[in-house]
Image: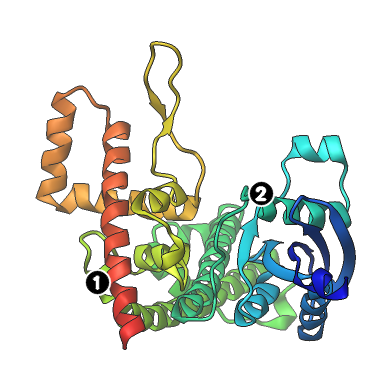
Amino acid sequence: MASRKQKRPVTGGVDTHKKTHHAAVVDQVGRVLGTEQFDATEAGYRALLAWMRRFGDVVKIGVEGTGSYGAGLARYLTSAKVELVEVDRPDRKARRRNGKSDPLDAISAALAALSGRANGVPKTRTGPVEAIRVLRVVRAGAVKARTAALNELHGLIVTAPETLRAALRQLSAAKLVAHCAAFLVDPTRLIDPEHATTAALGALARRIQDLNAEIKQADKQLKNLLATTAPRLCAVRGVGPQVAGQMLVTAGDNPDRLRSEAAFAHLCGVAPIPASSGNTERHRLNRGGDRHANSALYMLVLSRLAHDPRARAYKERRTTQGKTNKEIIRCLKRYAAREVLTALQADFATLNHS
């Protein structure tokens, strides 16, 4: 009996959290064999996999949050040669019907993996694309902080004493930051509202300068990484460093997980969704997928419409056929997704053979 138990195929599921992961195991007909909680550490990952293997031959594990709390576990399971699928969180209707708890979520993940409802292959996060992703995260944070600081700077100027406003009103953004950064602060005069305002403006301006330097450094690092990782993608018309970086992050270090060009279009939210009924045949806008990737393709299309004669000719032709600008842009985004994927596949084929 013990040997048969060890050989029976089982499926695992994991509900991930910051400090702990809750695991569940089900057999091939969906019967729950056990649930258990483990630490979100290397030792915890080893214990989790060993615990699952006590119930039989683990053929597949479904994991929630492979891009966040489950990233470490996903890397460990991938290195252990375990088949891994990405599981979406249960929808609200199912949670209202079945309740919500960590064991229930883990069981739901296992059942989703067993049934095939969850079949997405997680990103490996072990190659150059992961390096590009983390640098982009820092750059995006710096850009957001710079925008906030600039808004605060302009807000302080609006409420500043008139003498100070008059001196700063006509300056461009770059000259305004440079001018305010040069303000000197006398601690003995901070009780004066005008001097306190100049001190605050100077602090904000110097913060903006530091953030500008940080963004410039990140751009340089990303440009070098992109040049070596995806030269064909960067050569696609309309693809700049930010678009290329986002497309790489969307595809991941293992773009072979994208089963087809249509699957990539769905991932980017540029594949029209059927919405036919009765004698009416139509498609609607796809509002799913990676919205950052969708935005990157939008910027690519705008660049082509501004500079590419082929894109402008396509727009003119489709306009005469009665298409609106939004419809034309959606079509161009779909074509661009196909071209981007072809370049991505060529770049990764070169990386894998080098």
At 73% from the left and 46% from the top, the residue drawn is 90
Residue at the spot of label 1:
232
Question: Foreground mark, 1 or 2?
Answer: 2
Amino acid at dot 2: Ser
Find the residue positioned furthest to the bottom.
Answer: 354
Residue 168 falls left or right of residue 307: right
Q: Image quadrant for the N terminus? A: bottom right
Question: How far across and down, in percent of the image, does residue 20 sit?
Answer: 84, 71
Question: How far across and down, in percent of the image, does residue 214 sit?
Answer: 49, 80
Question: At numbered mark 2, what does the secondary structure look like: helix, strand or loop?
Answer: helix
Label 1: how many residues lie within 10 Å, few (<14), some (14-19) or many (20+)?
A: some
* Coloring applied to the structure: rainbow
Work out whether residue 144 or residue 331 is closer to the camera in this orientation and state it.
331
Asked whether residue 19 appears in the rendered view, the answer is no
Question: How far across and down, in percent of the image, does residue 350 sit?
Answer: 29, 80
Residue at the spot of label 2:
115
Question: At numbered mark 1, what does the secondary structure look like: helix, strand or loop?
Answer: helix
Figure quadrant of residue 75: bottom right
Amino acid at dot 1: Arg
